[in-house]
Amino acid sequence: MTIVTVPKVLRKKLGEDGADALVDFFNAATPDTDANLRVMPHLLLDKLGDEAAKGLAEYFAQVKKENGRA
């Protein structure tokens, strides 16, 4: 099982409860949700701000690469 940590910039924007909810979301994700996760940074752009969305997109790209889904 992959361990997911919420980057500091996201934890700051989301708050502790939001960051915990994001981790719960990832834990509940299935391979079918992979397509949705690819568009998620764009959907969160308004809520998280440009810098956080950029960091999230980079983080997803790194996780996908590490898991051989690049």
Image (cartoon, rainbow, N blue to C red):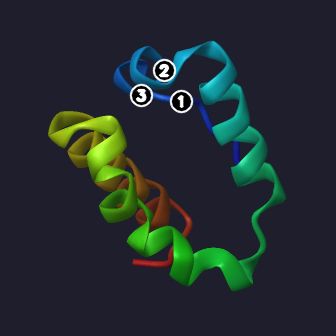
On screen, residue 46 versus residue 68, left or right, reads left
Q: Which x, y percent locates residue 30?
A: 78, 73
On screen, residue 45 versus residue 2, left or right, reads left
Foreground of the two, 3 or 54:
54
| Helix, strand or loop under label 3 | helix
Q: Which one is closest to the eye, mark 1 or mark 3?
A: 3
Disc 2: which residue: 11
At 62% from the left and 28% from the top, the residue drawn is 18
Give the alpha-carbon distance from disc 1 to disc 3, as whole Å.
Answer: 6 Å
| Helix, strand or loop under label 2 | helix
Disc 3: which residue: 10
Write down the quadrant of residue 7 in the picture: top left
Give the alpha-carbon distance from disc 1 to disc 2, as whole Å.
Answer: 6 Å
Q: Which one is closest to the eye, mark 1 or mark 2?
A: 2
* Placement of 69 over or under 67, stated as above or below: below
* Placement of 60 over or under 31, stated as above or below: above
Give the alpha-carbon distance from disc 2 to disc 3, as whole Å.
Answer: 4 Å
| Helix, strand or loop under label 1 | loop
At 38% from the left and 48% from the top, the residue drawn is 59
Dots 2, 3 in contact, CB < 8 A: yes
Q: Residue 6 carries which label?
A: 1
Q: Which x, y percent locates residue 19?
A: 61, 27
On screen, residue 8 versus residue 20, left or right, reads left
Q: Which amino acid does label 2 sit on?
A: Arg
Q: Earlier in the sequence, mark 1 or mark 2?
A: 1
